[in-house]
Amino acid sequence: MTRAFVFPGQGSQAIGMGKELLAAFPVARETLEEVDDALGQNLTRLMAEGPAEELTLTENAQPALMAVSMAVLRVLEAEGGVNIADACAFVAGHSLGEYSALAAARSFGLADTARLLKTRGQAMQKAVPVGEGGMAALLGAELDQAQEIADAAAEGQICAPANDNAPGQVVLSGSMGAIDRAIKIAGERGIRRSVKLPVSAPFHCAMMAPAAEVMEKALGKVEFVRPLVPVIANVTAAAAENPDDIRALLVEQVTSMVRWRESVLAMRDTGVDTVIELGAGKVLSGLTKRIDRDMTALNAESPDDIEAVLKTF
């Protein structure tokens, strides 16, 4: 068995996430406390009690999702004796999950990761006034079809594929007018379903350029070291290990498409047969099965999940 550890992105957050984990394992509670201290904010309470609209704010959702992922990893390490350097061949994460993956591989520390994601969330929100940009999922569209729809819808505005998640699931991002046109064009071209996403900004497109500048400065102040295992980068769908390369890729990631489908295929093609999703929800586990049904996909969020995952070691 050759494993990859993968880490979820925005959209997987929910009130009560990590609740059973925190109740069962002191190391999980300590992880959340470390994040709270780094941010000077009680994210632990927000995750437990809400309100949901505050947790969904990108500046809160990003560090919160990372914190749950890291709590799961630390439980695996403390309770199961898992050593990430031996346990998996690669790490990867979807969008903000790439930061979780790098923290898991010890490329930078937990407190730095929390602060970077808080900054990233704030910068992404400020980059585009609310209502001027949006995102839409095209269900039943392949990447080349989605690109053609985006090009037809742009009409001088920004519209581009933002997430190539799985066969038949591509997300577009851009100006709200262009996104509305893209949904109409997709219907005319026989795409099964197009759904405008409930997001507050057009992530992973050129409209995020101001946020990329902020992240370049923020990442420049953080010490990176070589990860214990290679990270499959969102931007290239290829392994990265050099700290300077990783830093540059994280800046580029803000305005670039998340090449998730290709990332999973790249891991498969180098021998990975089992993908374990650490953190909230089962989004990446589900996408893995859509990308290649022969791969094993597990998720670890609750104590029962962790017990099941540890049995595979």
Image: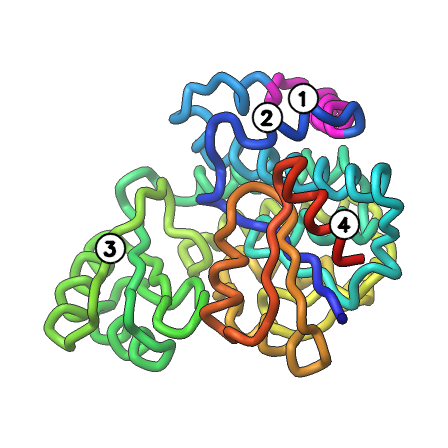
Residue positioned 49% across, 37% down in the render: 13
Quadrant into which the N terminus falls? bottom right
The residue pinned by badge 1 equals: 23
- Please indicate whether residue 275 sits to the left or right of residue 59 in the image: right
Numbered circle sitting on residue 232: none
The residue pinned by badge 2 equals: 19
Mark 1 Cα shell of 10 Å, populated few (<14), some (14-19), many (≥20): few
Q: Secondary structure at mark 2?
A: helix
The stretch of residues the image draws in magenta is 28-44
The residue pinned by badge 4 equals: 310
Mark 2 Cα shell of 10 Å, populated few (<14), some (14-19), many (≥20): some
Q: Are marks 4 and 3 in contact (CB under 8 Å)?
A: no
Question: Mark 4 against mark 2, which lies toward the viewer?
Answer: 4
The residue pinned by badge 3 equals: 195
Instruction: Report how far apart the C-alphas of labels 2 and 3 lie in the structure.
Output: 30 Å
In which quadrant of the rendered view does residue 93 lie? bottom right
Instruction: Report how far apart the C-alphas of labels 1 and 3 lie in the structure.
Output: 37 Å
x and y percent of residue 181 in the render? 16, 62
